[in-house]
Image: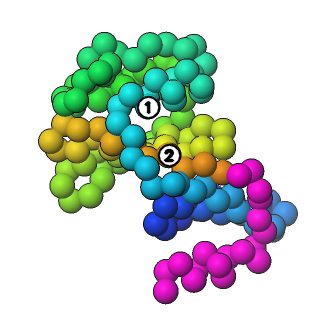
Amino acid sequence: MVAVSVPDQIWEIEYLEHGGIEIEVFKSDGYIFDCNELDVLFREFGEWTSNLPKSLQNATVYTREDFFGLLKALDEDKIWYAIRRGDADETILVEVSVPGQKWEIRLSSDGSINIKKFISDGIIFDEKEIPQLLKQFE
């Protein structure tokens, strides 16, 4: 599978064993959420519905230790995520995948958390849609 990010969209392109290709498009409305949206993530998709660490509840500035507490909570609730370094400003990016949604949770160097959500309409496209994806890079 290949994930391609373009402005306000994430395309998942999956290469199947039989040679076919399936594409699912996740779209964002561009709205940026604060940390309070994390409650929605755990309430709707957490297997064990654990509570967020107290240090993440209603705070406006987070330490890296607080943020790693979030990763521990994701692990405990069996929510799939990938972590990587973000932009050159030392941002930490956690990419969360749940059914029909992708979440990007960013911890900025100033301690703020910003969340962007991408939603799929559930339509799976085939390889004929790839030229449409490529047009977005022009």
Q: Looking at the picture, how far across and down is residue 78, in whole percent?
A: 55, 24
Region in magenta: 121-138
User: Would you identify the image quadrant in which residue 13 lies?
Assistant: bottom right
**Mark 2: secondary structure:** strand
Residue beneath disc 1:
37
Seen from the viewer's position, the closer of residues 60 and 135 is: 60
Residue 117 in sight here: yes
Residue 3 in sight here: no
Amino acid type at image mark 2: Lys
Q: Identify the residue at image location x=84%, y=63%.
A: 18
Q: Identify the residue at image location x=72%, y=74%.
A: 129
Q: Are circles 1 and 2 on residues that touch, CB within 8 Å?
A: yes
Placement of 34 over or under 137, stated as above or below: above
Q: Is residue 126 magenta?
A: yes
Q: Is residue 11 left or right of residue 121?
A: left
Residue reaching furthest to the left: 110
User: Would you identify the image quadrant in which residue 126 lies?
Assistant: bottom right
Amino acid type at image mark 1: Glu
Q: Looking at the picture, how far across and down is residue 72, in whole percent?
A: 39, 22
